[in-house]
Image: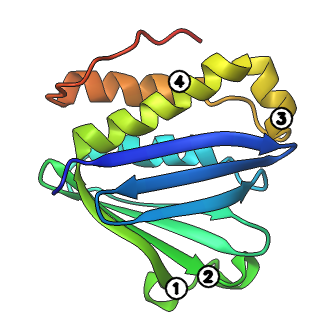
Amino acid sequence: MTGQIEFDWQLSGSGWAICRIADAVAEAKFGVSYCTDALADLLYGLGGMYRSEPVERVSFDLEPVEIRWVLRGVGTGVDVSIYRFADMSASFDAPDADGTVSWRSTQPRSRLVHAVIGAAQEVLQEHGEAGYKARWVRFPFPVAALQDLQRLHLLNDDCDQPHEPFVP
């Protein structure tokens, strides 16, 4: 586990966002469509990393490509494997191995979750709930998902990074 992780979520147009994840070795960047509630799904998926024996799958629609995040808890870490499938409508039930690995890393859960929480908070601060809904179109800002994940993070992780108070 490297502990070097960056995550960004930028609204880039009506119904589109740029998602970027990087560690010390590699970076992945995707143009994500509003056809799924991608940011909320990722926040809830990471929340699942606080259960015993966690495995979560989160799909982003890139129209038509599917990006599938497979999150596996490994002790106090998370193994993140991101698979790319050519067509989301055809890959719905496909096993992960049918996809092409786009990015993979094992990170301390505290660092990964902290990075994603920080990016989500930045989006909320920049756009507000109304601005997010206006730009993301189909779904509101995932306030509950962010609050849940932050609560789990603060209760369960020994995080040595500074924490901004959550203000919806």
Q: Earlier in the sequence, mark 2 or mark 3?
A: 2
Name the amino acid type tagged 4. Gln
Residue identified by numbered label 1: 99
* Residue at figure coordinates x 59%, y 51% from the top left: 19
Name the amino acid type tagged 2. Phe
Examine the image and state in which quarter residue 80 appears. bottom left
Helix, strand or loop at disc 4? helix
Can residue 144 be seen here?
no
Q: Which mark is residue 85?
A: 2
Residue identified by numbered label 3: 135
Q: Seen in the image, is 76 located left or right of residue 107? A: left
Q: Position of residue 126 (x, y in %)?
A: 67, 20
Q: Marks 1 and 2, Cα distance to the nearest angstrom?
A: 5 Å
Residue identified by numbered label 4: 121
Q: Are marks 1 and 4 in contact (CB under 8 Å)?
A: no
Q: Seen in the image, is 143 located left or right of residue 81? A: right
